[in-house]
Image (cartoon, rainbow, N blue to C red):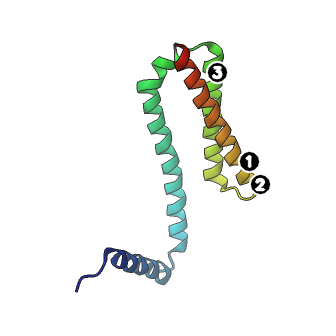
Amino acid sequence: MRISPFLRNLAILAVVAVAIVALNAETALATANALLSIAFFIVIGVVLYFVWRDFGRREIATWGDRATWVFYAAVALLLVDIGWWFVSAPQGRNALVSIAVGAICAYVGVRTWREQRRYS
């Protein structure tokens, strides 16, 4: 008898959930979740740094001072915004403000980059 992969994966997930509840491992699971969230944020930062180091740094060095400052300020504020999202998990108005700040930072960064590519 063949079981569909979806049902098999649901059964595996159910067994893991029952094991966590039976062993009273919710605290360990919450700790692992916190550590993985921090590690995920660090890995994203490292990957973005490598991309910037390999490609962006040379191009951004040819831009004017104002465009460079605006671009780096938008990136820095976006990183603070993402970090705040990971640390505090905002809800309600705070989540709306966080999403708005992230969208504005992305818009400013992309627009600055496109303007500099257009006039280069």
| Residue 24, image x, y percentages | 51, 79
Residue 69, numbered circle? 3
Residue 114, numbered circle? none
Which residue is depicted at the point 28% across and 81% down? 3
| Residue 53, image x, y percentages | 44, 26
101 versus 17 height, above or below:
above
**64 sits to left or right of 2:** right
111 versus 67 height, above or below:
below
Query: Crowdedness of circle 1 by 10 Å Cα count: few (<14), some, many (20+)?
Result: some
For the residues bearing labels 1 and 2, Cβ distance under 8 angstroms = yes
Which residue is depicted at the point 77% across and 54% down? 93
Spatial CA span between label 1 and label 2? 6 Å
| Residue 36, image x, y percentages | 49, 56
Identify the residue at the far left of this view.
1
- Amino acid type, label 3: Trp
Spatial CA span between label 2 and label 3? 29 Å
Residue hosting label 1: 97
Mark 2 or 3, nearer chain start = 3
74 or 87, nearer to the observer? 74
Residue hosting label 2: 93
